[in-house]
Image (tube, helix red, strand yellow):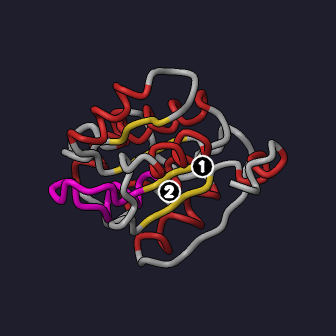
Amino acid sequence: MKFNDLTIKPEIKKALDDLGFKEMFPIQENAIPPMLEGKNVMGQAKTGTGKTASFGVPMLEKLDPESGNVEGFVIAPTRELAQQITDDINSYGKYLKTRAVSIYGGVSYNPQIDALRKGVTIVVGTPGRLIDLMKKGHLNLRHVTMVALDEADRMFDMGFYED
């Protein structure tokens, strides 16, 4: 299946075309259409096979950037992966008003809190910092309609099960 065969916003198609995305990987072909229909999906694929697009494209299609609320929520085990996911989602949505932001530890809270205050549609982060910001009242998940756990098995191995 080709990305151009999807019924998605032309801005997303243009961004994907700019990135050279033509044919879908199996994880994308099996995940994107059902997610666009509002179905829950669980998938597993090796690194480099397009998992981020598998959940990022449907999020960009379904979420409302005009709402001013966090509607998409992605949890990743490391800050490097969280930043990579954020960069990828922002590149798929570069022609949209939708904005993703990374939230992770090891850096100052202030820029992350400022980004949340300005309004973002998708938050991508690591469990510890996400929990901190929720407890402090800076991250509100009331309006979240789409959630992705990237490398959930790795998070459990790292001890995030309790979180």
Residue type, label 2: Phe
Rendering quarter of residue 16: top left
For the point 49% across and 64% down, which residue is it?
32
72 shown above or below 123? below
Q: Secondary structure at mark 1?
A: helix
Q: Is residue 109 left or right of residue 113?
A: right
> Residue 104 in the image: x percent, y percent?
53, 33
**Chain part drawn in magenta:** 56-72
User: At 63% from the left edge and 50% from the top edge, which residue is drawn?
Assistant: 150
- Horizontally, residue 65 falls left or right of residue 134, namely left
**Label 1 is placed on what type of residue?**
Lys
Cα distance in 3D space between marks 1 and 2: 7 Å
Quarter placement of the C terminus? bottom right
Name the residue carrying label 2.
55
Residue highlighted by disc 1: 51
Q: Residue furthest left?
A: 66
How many labels were placed on the picture? 2
Q: Is residue 92 above or below residue 30?
A: above
Whole-percent x, y for residue 117 in the image: 24, 41
Labels 1 & 2 near each other (Cβ < 8 A)? yes
> Left or right of 27: which side holds 6?
left
